[in-house]
Image: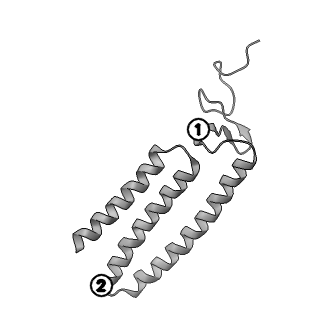
Amino acid sequence: MNAAIWATVGALFSAGLAMVVLRRQLLAMLLGVELMIAAVNVALVHYAGVFSDAQALAAVAIVIAVAAAEAVVGLSLILKVLRSGKGLDAGDLAELRGRRVFRCCSRIRPCWRCSPRR
């Protein structure tokens, strides 16, 4: 039973990590983070059940509240990006704090490769 729980936790966490690393869509990345948080919650609930630990169950409640807040903030940022006319692909975003970040060198100021030709 114990090995099955840890295999499930590992599979959930690995699937979430793969979604964050391999997918370029913002919504899929957010869902991957939520899946990793759910895997951690499964591990905490299992620990609380095995050791009869009430503090672990309190930690689970706090993690669920933080995950809900993170989902709300993430979805609102995704909607803001979508309404601004940009796509939901993470590679399409080229601004940081309202400043344009140049694609060739990821700097705020353009280098000789991305400066306009005169």
Decide: is 20 above or below 34. Answer: above
Residue found at the far top of this picture: 118
Lateral position of residue 30 relative to residue 16, left or right:
right
Q: Residue at left 60%, top 42%?
A: 89
Q: Amino acid at mark 1?
A: Gly
Decide: is 26 above or below 34. Answer: above
Query: Which residue in the protein does label 2 denote?
Result: 51
Q: Residue at left 64%, top 59%?
A: 75
Circle 2 sits in a helix, a strand or a loop, which is it?
Answer: helix
Q: Position of residue 67 (x, y in %)?
A: 54, 68
Looking at the rendering, which quadrant does residue 107 occupy?
A: top right
Rate crowding at label 1 as few (under 14), some (14 to 19) or many (20 or more) other CA atoms within 10 Å: few
Q: Position of residue 110 (x, y in %)?
A: 68, 26
Figure quadrant of the N terminus? bottom left
Circle 1 sits in a helix, a strand or a loop, which is it?
Answer: helix
Lateral position of residue 109 relative to residue 104, left or right:
right
Which badge, 2 or 1, is on the more N-terminal residue? Answer: 2
Q: Foreground: 109 or 44?
A: 44
Q: Amino acid at mark 2?
A: Phe
Query: Which residue in the protein does label 1 denote?
Result: 91
Q: Position of residue 104 (x, y in %)?
A: 59, 26
Lateral position of residue 29 relative to residue 36, left or right:
right
Decide: is 69 above or below 104. Answer: below
Mark 2 and mark 1: span between their CA atoms? Answer: 45 Å
Any mark on residue 33, and which? none
Looking at the rendering, which quadrant does residue 12 occupy?
A: bottom left
Q: Position of residue 10 (x, y in %)?
A: 32, 61
